[in-house]
Amino acid sequence: MTAPHGQFALLLDLAKETSSEKRRDLLRQVTEVFVENDNARTDKEAELFDDIFAAVSADMEVAVRAELAKKIAKSNAPLSRTARRLALSEIEVARPVIEKSRALTEHDILDVIERKGQEHMMAVTKRDDIGERVSSALVNRGEDNVVASLLENRTARIDRGTFEKVAERAQANPLLHAPFVKNQNAPLDLLNEVYLQVEQKLRREIMRKFHGVAPGDLADALAASKNRLSQAYGALPQDYMASVEYVDGMEKWKPLEPANLTVMLRENRTTAFCIAFAKMTEVDVTLVLRLVDTTDLDAIAMLAKGAGFDKSLFVTICLLIAKDSANMNRAQALGQLYSDVSQAAAQRALRFWKVRQSAKRAA
């Protein structure tokens, strides 16, 4: 071990040396003493190293600083100024320090996000101590791949407001779909909001989360959902008012029955079907119009299962919507699709759509 007076001599030599080659050799020696060997220096000596490195680092080559950065990233030495300077350097120097160094404060990390680019932000997403302020800054400034990496970080803390921003971005950005749905802390009502945009495999993942939710958590999510009502999906069809009168006229004679739905579809009264289906499932008619327009049979299965429709009725409705009523193989596949949806999970998910509909009526 280098004697104390030898340690200070190394630091002084490093501060005075102008030759880049000799400076590199001295830096390696100093690093071994002050960084790699925690027992070889006091905090005061580490502070001195911090000061001297800050003064000479600007003249060091990238390769030298990159070598030092890897060691600083693993060290427990209180080298905050050194770590900060490295974190704000070129990405090949900054990456290990940003990802691992404990010498960086939250303020340092926020400064990196504010001052540097996407590669530096991507490195931030790999840390295991990301707090809510850092998550918010990453979502505000980061591109989709940065946000996706943040969502995949199991230790990152993300608050409700930041999750809402991610949910809004996920509506139009498929890259965020899987990381958002699979994030263990994503709010249930926000998962419900992206349900229509994601692929079938991810819809199953959302249904599994609804199936296992505790009653209290579901109540909290429903309350949050009331504050985030979705907008109408588009203009109403031209025959909407006439279809409303048609359905209202039917209801004057007797309550709507499931059999009425298939009759409407067979008579090509698609808008009337959507209105009646929305009434029977207690959801917003604009949602049903959208599902029928896009032939989203998977989502229709969720609504039908949650409302307690018979499987054979669901299959018939879907075949009529898809204009494929003679296809027996398709019928069997649809029947299996319906069976795969858990009724309990579907009912929980359906409650969010009902909340939106009731709030819309109240407004």
Image (cartoon, grey):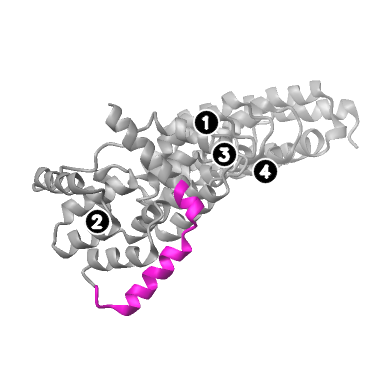
- In the image, taking residue 130 as reference, residue 210 lies left or right, namely left
The answer to which of marks 1 and 2 sits earlier in the sequence is 1
Label 4 belongs to which residue?
70
Residue 342 highlighted magenta (yes or no):
yes
Q: Which of marks 3 and 1 is in front?
A: 3
Tell me which segment is drawn in magenta. Answer: 325-347
| SS at badge 3 | helix
- State how far apart marks 1 and 2 are (Cα): 35 Å
The answer to which of marks 3 and 1 sits earlier in the sequence is 1
For residue 292, the mark is: 2
Q: In this view, does 97 lie above or below 295?
A: above
The amino acid pointed to by label 3 is: Pro
The answer to which of marks 4 and 1 sits earlier in the sequence is 4
Q: In this view, does 253 lie above or below 34?
A: below
Residue 110 x %, y %: 53, 27
| SS at badge 4 | helix
Label 3 belongs to which residue?
215
The amino acid pointed to by label 2 is: Val
- State how far apart marks 4 and 1 are (Cα): 32 Å
Residue 193 highlighted magenta (yes or no):
no
* Foreground pick, 139 / 99: 139
